[in-house]
Amino acid sequence: MSGQFIPELGERLLLPFATLLFREELEDMDNDALAHIALRLREQEPGVEKSNEGGWHSQGNIFARQEPELAMLATHIQNAVRYLCSVSAQIQNQQVALSASLFGWFNVNEQGDYNLPHHHAGHTWSGVYYVHTGTEVANRPMSGRLELLDPRVRCDVAPKQGFSHSSSMTIQPRNGLLLMFPSYLEHFVHPYHGSEPRITLAFNSLVQKMTVSA
């Protein structure tokens, strides 16, 4: 990843209040190993209640564990954080060094489990990695989908006919998909209706220091 891919919008068009959404397919991850870790931990320890309605939310920082698969995923996330910070600051062709914390947790959802609308205050970037999306249900197209809500207040003041500034975005999860967005962005997960466990690894990153060199 490099800042050289940042588009030059020019003088006629700027994006002063854009909300960035990072997405990347991680092809080198061992999702079966990650799923095994998550399901083993669910058997060994009780979960905690956060935004989850049902389901299992692991305790503590999952990246403090020693499994190499978690270390590899942490590296992908840290690289993505560096890239997103560069894009946000419109930095091109320069080296960006960050001091950033990373805190993650497993979520395991069964039929009927979901996550309420929430955001992650006190952090810079948040995201999710899809380990195992479970099974699709033909008559439940929104099953397990992530929905991102428009963070801009007063966007719905205009009439709805024709064009509206207010919107939301739904994400169809896929195994191996990494998503990241600003932590202020409110989001939720639709109820899951599949027959197999739906396993994700969610995370927060707090960027404490950022330096740029030529």
Image: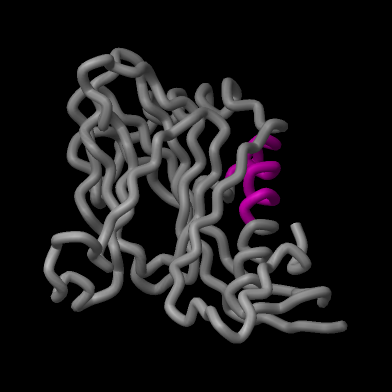
Q: How many labels does the image show?
A: 0
What kind of secondary structure does the magenta stretch mostly adopt? Answer: helix
Residue 202 horizontal side relative to residue 186, left or right: right
Please provide percent x and percent y for residue 6: 68, 68
Is the N terminus in the top left, top right, bottom left or bottom right quadrant?
bottom right
Vertical side of 206 occupied by 63: above or below: above
Quadrant of the rendered image containing residue 162: bottom left
Please provide percent x and percent y for residue 141: 27, 26
Residue 69: within the magenta?
yes
Please provide percent x and percent y for residue 7: 66, 68
Residue 84 horizontal side relative to residue 50, left or right: right
Range covered by the magenta-colored residues: 65-77
Query: In the rendered image, is residue 36 in sight?
Result: yes
Quadrant of the rendered image containing residue 137: top left
Quadrant of the rendered image containing residue 56: top left
Is the C terminus in the top left, top right, bottom left or bottom right quadrant?
bottom right
Vertical side of 112 occupied by 93: above or below: below
Kindly identify the residue that appears in the image at 65 percent across and 37 percent down.
26
Kindly identify the residue that appears in the image at 72 percent across and 32 percent down.
28
Kindly identify the residue that appears in the image at 32 percent across and 54 percent down.
148
Residue 110: within the magenta?
no
Residue 57 horizontal side relative to residue 102, left or right: left
